[in-house]
Every structure is written in C-alpha cells, then in structure tokens.
Amino acid sequence: MKTTKILYWVFNGLFALVMFGSGIPAVMSSPDEIKGIHEVLGYPVYIIPFIGAAKIMGSVAILVPGYPRLKEWAYAGLTFDLILATFSVYTVPPPEGKWYFMFVFLALAAAAYIYYHKLVKITSTEKP
C-alpha cells in the first residue's frame, strides 16, 4: 500500500508538472510556443491558449482528490494531447522533428494512469 501510494504521487506529480509546465507558455501565447505550434507544425494561433488552458485544468484535475469521472476525462484528454503532439512532431521533417523523446511522456502518462487505478483498487478494498 505504501509503495503504491508513493509511486502514485511520484508518477502523477511528474505527469502533472510536465503538462502544467507545457500549458503555461501556451496560455500566455509565448513567441516560442507560437513558433513551434503555429509556424513549424502549422496549427492555428487561436488554438494555442485553448490547449494550454486544457492542459492546466487537466493537471489540476488529476491531482485533486476525489472526482473519479473528472480524473478519467483528464487522463484521457492529456493522453490524447500527447498522442497528437507525438504524431505532429513525427510528421515534421528533421532536424526539428525529433519525435522519439515523446515516448518518455507517453510512458509517464501510462504509469500515472496505471498507479491511479492501483490506488483506487487498494483503497476501495480497505475496510474502514
């Protein structure tokens, strides 16, 4: 139980930190974010703050206790974002398209989700 809780908080904390940290420059529409998402990848500028806000809200949702349905949606949304980002970076020709590092973030998302469900299973079987 103790190891599962520790790993849950480590993986979810890191995952939330990564997603929250990538959401802040997007919400602020920083020049680097606009260059990377709009100029390099070709996405419209108006989508950048929306994606950033969604990342921030999803990061908060996975850390707040309770609200299991909201957590499921947050994990799904953040994972879809990572899959889209991986595919987008993959389609950009080198040198900018180094896409294989994205598997680290996808693995982190998977570990966070797996340990979330392990913790839910353990806490639901405990007797009060």
Image (tube, rainbow, N blue to C red):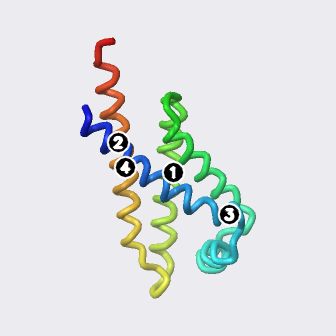
Alpha carbon distance from label 1 to label 3: 15 Å
Alpha carbon distance from label 1 to label 4: 14 Å
Does residue 28 appear to the left or right of 101 in the view shown? right
Alpha carbon distance from label 2 to label 1: 17 Å
The mark lying in front, picked from 3 and 2, is 2
Observer-nearest of 71 and 2? 2
| SS for dot 2 | helix
Does residue 99 appear to the left or right of 41 in the view shown? left
Residue 40's x, y, as percent? 60, 79
Quarter occupied by the C terminus: top left
The residue pinned by badge 2 equals: 8
Q: Residue at x 49, y 55 (%)?
A: 17
Q: Residue at x 51, y 61 (%)?
A: 84
Label 1 with label 4: CB-CB less than 8 Å: no
The residue pinned by badge 1 equals: 78
Q: Earlier in the sequence, mark 3 or mark 4?
A: 4
Amino acid at dot 4:
Phe
Residue 44's x, y, as percent? 71, 68
- Crowd class of label 3 (few under 14; some 14 to 19; many from 20; radius 10 Å): many
Amino acid at dot 1:
Leu
Does residue 51 appear to the left or right of 82 in the view shown? right
Label 2 with label 4: CB-CB less than 8 Å: yes
Q: Earlier in the sequence, mark 1 or mark 3?
A: 3
Amino acid at dot 3:
Ile
The residue pinned by badge 4 equals: 11
